[in-house]
Image (cartoon, rainbow, N blue to C red):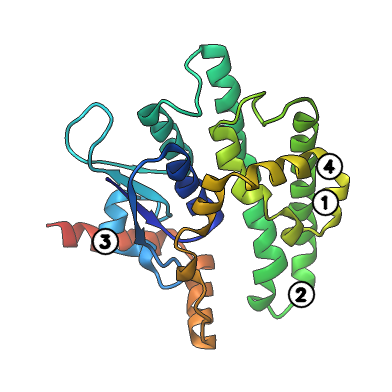
């Protein structure tokens, strides 16, 4: 059994989609990121970067004690090795996949996260909307560029890393599926090969099951007080706050 410390966001969906695709048994352990669950001492022992997702495999590859892994890219690589699926073994094919996995981790996810922050959240954090113009333009523009990168790749390949579905697609689809919500519907008209891929991957039953996993967790409507607390937790973290959370985790572990 694999415990998935999870909240229904694109980074969480990557893991549940992979587990559904591989047919591996798992259970969700909710980490309410809006209520500070990522700072709980037990979770920090699994994910020192205080970010979900993280997994604990109670029957790990190679045997031994339960294995905890954080960072979605590392988790997908591990699950691919454990299941023998969606990551080729031949070096050239393997690294053709892994380069796109690392591309997503370094580019698509962070840029879409920053664009979403400036476009949809930052207006509630400042009294001067003019401060948001450059940041919004910078990150939304970068997301538009990355959409073009994927469209060019998919114009010559069925999937991101070639002819075969892989963890490159699994890690990228959750964010790419939200492009129109972040930019607008014109992104699909501008990138038809990307739209073809988003639709094709989204039709896979395992993708649909993984995307729906725990969806009820994020459906509760928050009060204004809860929304303010959520913004403070998500957007005002400092090294001092992280250090305090780590110290609390260390005390709890003694």
Q: In this orientation, which residue lies closer to the viewer: 42 or 215?
A: 215
The secondary element bearing badge 1 is classed as: helix
Q: Are marks 3 and 1 in contact (CB under 8 Å)?
A: no
Residue at left 31%, top 55%?
A: 44
Q: Report x, y in % for residue 174.
A: 60, 49
Residue located at (76% from left, 47% from top)? 142
Question: Which quadrant of the structure image shows residue 214?
Answer: bottom left
Give the residue at mark 3: 41
Q: Earlier in the sequence, mark 2 or mark 4?
A: 2
Q: In which image quadrant can residue 169 be found?
A: top right
Task: Tell me what residue is drawn at x 70 percent, y 57 percent.
Answer: 115
Q: Are marks 2 and 4 in contact (CB under 8 Å)?
A: no
The residue pinned by badge 4 equals 192
> Counting residues from the N terminus, which is met first, the one under dot 2 or under dot 1?
2
Mark 3 vs mark 1: in front: 1
Q: Is residue 174 left or right of residue 254?
A: right
The image position of residue 109, as x and y in percent, is 61, 47
Q: Earlier in the sequence, mark 4 or mark 3?
A: 3
**Of labels 3 and 2, the one closer to you:** 3
Rendered image: mark on residue 129: 2
């Amino acid at each position: 059994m694999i415990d998935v410390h999870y909240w229904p966001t694109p980074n969480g969906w990557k893991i549940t989609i992979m587990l559904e695709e591989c047919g591996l048994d798992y259970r969700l352990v909710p980490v309410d990121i809006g209520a500070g669950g990522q700072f709980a001492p037990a979770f920090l022992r699994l994910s020192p970067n205080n970010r979900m997702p993280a997994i604990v495999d109670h029957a790990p590859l190679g045997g031994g004690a339960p294995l905890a892994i954080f960072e979605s890219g590392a988790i997908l690589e591990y699950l691919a090795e454990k299941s023998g699926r969606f990551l080729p073994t031949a070096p050239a094919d393997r690294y053709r996949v892994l380069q796109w996995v690392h591309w997503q981790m370094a580019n698509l996810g962070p840029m879409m996260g920053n664009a979403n922050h400036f476009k949809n959240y930052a207006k509630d954090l400042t009294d001067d909307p003019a401060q948001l113009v450059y940041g919004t333009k910078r990150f939304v523009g970068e997301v538009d560029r990355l959409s073009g990168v994927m469209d060019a790749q998919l114009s010559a390949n069925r999937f991101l890393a070639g002819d075969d579905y892989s963890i490159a697609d699994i890690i990228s689809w959750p964010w790419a599926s939200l492009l129109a919500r972040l930019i607008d519907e014109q992104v699909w008209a501008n990138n038809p090969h990307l739209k073809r891929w988003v639709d094709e991957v989204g039709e896979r039953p395992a993708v649909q099951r993984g995307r729906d996993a725990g969806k009820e967790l994020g459906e509760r409507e928050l009060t204004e007080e809860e929304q303010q607390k959520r913004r403070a937790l998500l957007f005002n973290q400092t090294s001092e706050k992280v250090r305090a959370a780590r110290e609390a985790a260390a005390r709890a572990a003694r």
